[in-house]
Image (spheres, rainbow, N blue to C red):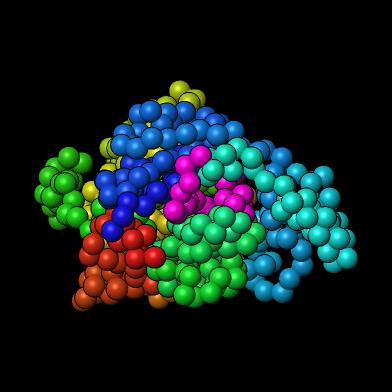
Amino acid sequence: MKKLKCLIFVEVDVVVRHFIHNQSFKNIVLNHEVKFVFPNDTQRFHNIDPEKLKLSAPYVRINHNEKRHVLWKKMLHINQLQFKFGKQEKALRKLRRKTLKWKAFLLYTFLGLPMIWHIYKFVKFRHLFRSTNLKMLEVFEDFKPDLAIHPCVLEGVFINDLIQITKEKKIPSIVIMNSWDNPSTKNAMVGNPDWLLVWGKQTQTHAIKYCKMKEKNVIQFGAAQFDLYRKPSKIIKKNFHKNYKFEVKDVIILFAGSSVGTDEIKQLTLLDNAINQGLFKDVKIIYRPHPWGGGGKNGSKIFDQKWNNIKFDRSMINYLNNLKIGVKDKYLSDYSETHDILSNIDAVISPLSTILIEAAIHGKPSLCFLPDEDRSTHFEINVGLDHFKDIFESKLFLKANGYKDLIPKTLDLIELLKSDGLSIKLKEGSEYYVKNFNKPFANRLNEFIEKI
């Protein structure tokens, strides 16, 4: 077939990590004419330089229209604060109230009152749709693409202007979701792309419900960042145990931290004491902090702890060293590191986090731990959100409600390891969240654009 001209819009560091570093567009770049578009705003990239990304295709940076972006986001927040029936809607209101300053909360609540919202939305939408993001329009008119692709979180500086321009110019658009909460909680799209590529059945259902998209336009496509999980780990279990100085007989539990600053030192100390007291036999813990969670409460003191049965994830040592000297940088870990550790541990303990799904993809059982402390109101809200609710209600995942449950439920987790066919059940169950494919993401994406 003839070469297609494709614009690919990328705007945040996690998308660079999940799609560019993963070479998700490799086949499209090889087979078609591609231009990448980045925002001219280094803060959104956390100093990632497009020159160093090995794109193998030209790129352009454009100044985004901050006023338009702020207005799109404001409309989303007002809509989320409006009273609607349902646990998801209630949880979203609580979450939004928690993230907004009190003046913005009062203003947005007022603007969301039925009659006021009807007038306000009419005026603002009229303004937004009668004008255009001129910088983005210039890119379209200069390149004359056959297709626009935008991997994103369904919110940001590009999404709505891109949908508007592609609709006006009758250019097909593909949006690829970045993470599992995007269709249900992050969706700021006004109008819809021609196709939305989602992880699996769960996010397809959420896209139909919350993005108001037709089922035929929402495609279960898997997760680009988990593509390498199809491959064998670079390290075998024997060498993995040797690297951490574990015995072959040891049961290894990965404790994956959260991003909301709970007391992970206390949580790990409880587990270490339980092992010291003989409650868990032949059990060792590897602690992996959340890559931007700062080690939780007093995370800078994590290296000062005298634990007997807990080791640190070797790939996160530099991150933990930086915490000790007061440097709290966001660490965009390599998924190959996550793959290696999940391939060689036996089970996972973590709060509500994507790593629970990643563990299931690897056939490893997990315990979802919700600590009951001042900083954990975030978890109480999240339990009501649909993407988390599926995890919390699933029989695939054990749950520990508060500190009183942590040790007894960890015992249940260890006992669960004896179950026949457990790994197969977990892998099959994980496909509800992330559909599995034999072909690499890059191949399938190239075939998809050629087909449409």
Residue 151 locus on image (x, y percent): 45, 51
Q: Residue at x 62, y 62 (%)?
A: 191
Give the quadrant of the C terminus: bottom left
- Report the side of 93 relative to 357 (left or right): right
Classify 24 as above or below 388.
Answer: above
Q: Is residue 190 left or right of residue 206?
A: right
Q: Position of residue 424 (x, y in %)?
A: 24, 72
158 or 13, nearer to the observer? 158
User: Which of 59 and 42 lies nearest the eye of the viewer?
Assistant: 59
Q: Residue furthest top?
A: 325
Question: Does residue 152 show up magenta in the picture?
Answer: yes
In the image, the segment drawn in magenta is 142-165
Q: Residue at x 58, y 73 (%)?
A: 209
Is 225 positioned to the left or the right of 158 in the image?
A: left
- The residue depicted at 16 percent of the width and 46 percent of the height is 234
Residue 214: x and y in percent read 53, 74
Horizontal and vertical percent position of residue 231: 19, 55
Q: Is residue 434 visible?
A: no
- At a point 69% along the width and 50% down the height, the residue shown is 72
Report the label total. Answer: 0
Decide whether residue 374 is among the magenta residues.
no
Q: Nearer the viewer, residue 423 or 79?
A: 79
Q: Is residue 148 visible?
A: yes
Q: Determine the image quadrant of residue 115.
A: bottom right
Among the 4 quarters of the image, the one containing residue 1: bottom left
